[in-house]
Amino acid sequence: MHRIVKAHLDSYVRDNGLEAEDESSQFEKFVTHAVVSSRFSGSYEIDDLVTGEADDGIDGIAVVIDEEIIISAEDANSIFATQKRNHDVDIIFTQAKRTEGFDLGDFLKFKEAILRFITQNPYTSQDAVLQDTRSIFEVVLREVPKIRNGKPSLTARFVTTGIYQKPAALETALRDFSDQLAELGLFAEADIKFVGRDELTTLWVGTYSGIDASLELYSNAPLPKIAGIDEAYLAVVKASDFVENLLLSSDGNLRTQVFEENVRSFLGLENPVNASICATIRAGEGASRFPVLNNGITIASPDVRLQGNTLHLKNFQIVNGCQTSNVLFESRHHLGGIMVNVKVVETNNEDVFSELVRATNSQTKVEDNQFFSLRPVTKRIEQYFNSFSSEGKIYFERRDRQYVGQGIPALRIFSLQNAAKCVAAMFLNRPELSLRYPKTMYDELGDILFAENTKEVVFYAACLAYYRLSLLISNSTIPQNMKRFKWHMLALVRASISGKDAINISSRAAEKSSEEIIRIMAQHGPAATDLFSKIVDICRALGEVSPDRLKRQLILQEMLGQIP
């Protein structure tokens, strides 16, 4: 393996506690994470996307619906059950090879595996990830009338550590694959590429680097001093500059990361408002009225600098104007000299940032679970996490990419979703929701998890236990094959300490239980190791556990029955 790629791989392995896995498995996760993160900005668990030994030629696979990775057919059905009729769907395939060459045979195997995945009926595979993803794909195909453009999109990346020189045989195979997909007629777009070490490095660096951009201003006016805001400007910019400098990624795709704080996904060009925006853009002379007819775009950044007529932004977010931005991106070849209004706000105050997100996204109804991160309780949870300063400190990420570029191992950072999954599994006895049904988890438990009187300590205790378990798996104290039981293990930890029944997470009992969990899990020592060892014995006593059995609530009751 090329030493530059190896250095990045080693960093990824350390940050994610993957030392106990073989290099092949590590590289597959590294590649899949780099590729998926370049197309999708939310949080997910890499084990849900990477296949096992029975992968049949596909190393990584993900179905992204409306900028959310879906890992169960049930959650997919839940999304399509809404009134929305223009969902964005992309299915991503990866194949990772540590060699420095691009082998035609390996690529053909990758191609045939993808074709088999999308056409074989019934689909046969021994791999649980492929089986689950195929069931999601079946839901997608049934619901194509509700998908933007009437079909999903496909992305495929064949990755090695070499340099792709476009040999004739591989280029021919690539064209043949594209033609075969076109003939099938299942996808609105098929994006298939070979990725070498330089492109892979760029993708990987993009997973932890901030997003910087510069924007030439046609005109601007600074706003007067506002409490909690360092600087603010109203400006008019060329729409083409806005798209080129702020929205386009290095590979020509849309930078989805800049919309992480915008609680609405793109509603599509079929949406009446967006169709009107598009019509205005393409209206010839009428397009000059665009900045008057459109409300514009709001950008927030912790670091804004105005030098002359150039605005420099670091780690910016488009908190309002997602629809306008996407329409501009879709119409980027028709922008000409169109201007667009932008409001730029510099603030490092999290309260002001959250209020800005809430205020600029409240014009129409938004699903409540999209606002969980803005609830006051999440700020208190974050403050509780930050009150600890020990060597093994863990972090609560109230905002996506909040700790990016700060050198904090990924293993210690808990996104809002992962923290919620830890609490749902440990205190509410719903590990099956944490395992396979995160959307259902929010629907059923969101208001309980993020209630105003929820005890902050339950989040810290659950995440700390998960962190300790991850360390024990990474150093092989707990076998790798026990990782599949991790959510159930959290429930068993709490049950072993404070009883088998679910606990009201707003109660004093939850607080007492959490404090005892923290006492045991705070240090790497015999107390935590012995407790998890007993829980591993409980999991082993179940015998062979199928993926389907693991998804059911009943299995937790079987496990709890073995606790004295």
Image: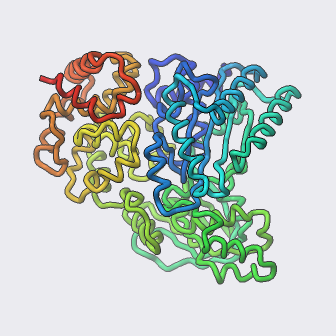
Residue 564 visible in the shown view: yes
Residue at horizontal 46 percent and vertical 64 percent from the top: 347
Does residue 8 show up? no
Relative to residue 417, is residue 553 depicted above or below? above
**Which residue is located at x 46 percent, y 77 percent?**
225
Q: Residue at x 78, y 42 (%)?
A: 183
Colouring rule applied to residues: rainbow
In this rendering, the answer to whether 469 lies above or below 93 is above
Q: Is residue 347 above or below residue 508?
A: below
* Between 89 and 4, the one nearer to me in the picture: 89
**Residue 423 higher or lower than 320, as above or below:** above
Q: Quadrant of the C terminus?
A: top left
Q: Count the marks: how many?
A: 0
Q: Residue 94: x percent and y percent?
A: 63, 32
The image position of residue 56, as x and y in percent, is: 61, 22
Where residue 374 sits: x, y (%)? 37, 60
Q: Residue 360 at x, y = what percent?
A: 47, 71
Furthest residue toward right: 168
Quarter of image, res 34: top right
- Looking at the picture, tell me which residue is in the foreground, 553 or 170: 553
Left or right: where 287 falls relative to 292: right
Q: Residue at x 39, y 24 (%)?
A: 546
- Drawn side of residue 80 relative to residue 521, left or right: right
Between 251 and 503, the one nearer to me in the picture: 503
Locate residue 391 relative to residue 149 in the image: left or right: left
The quarter of the picture where the N terminus appears is: top right
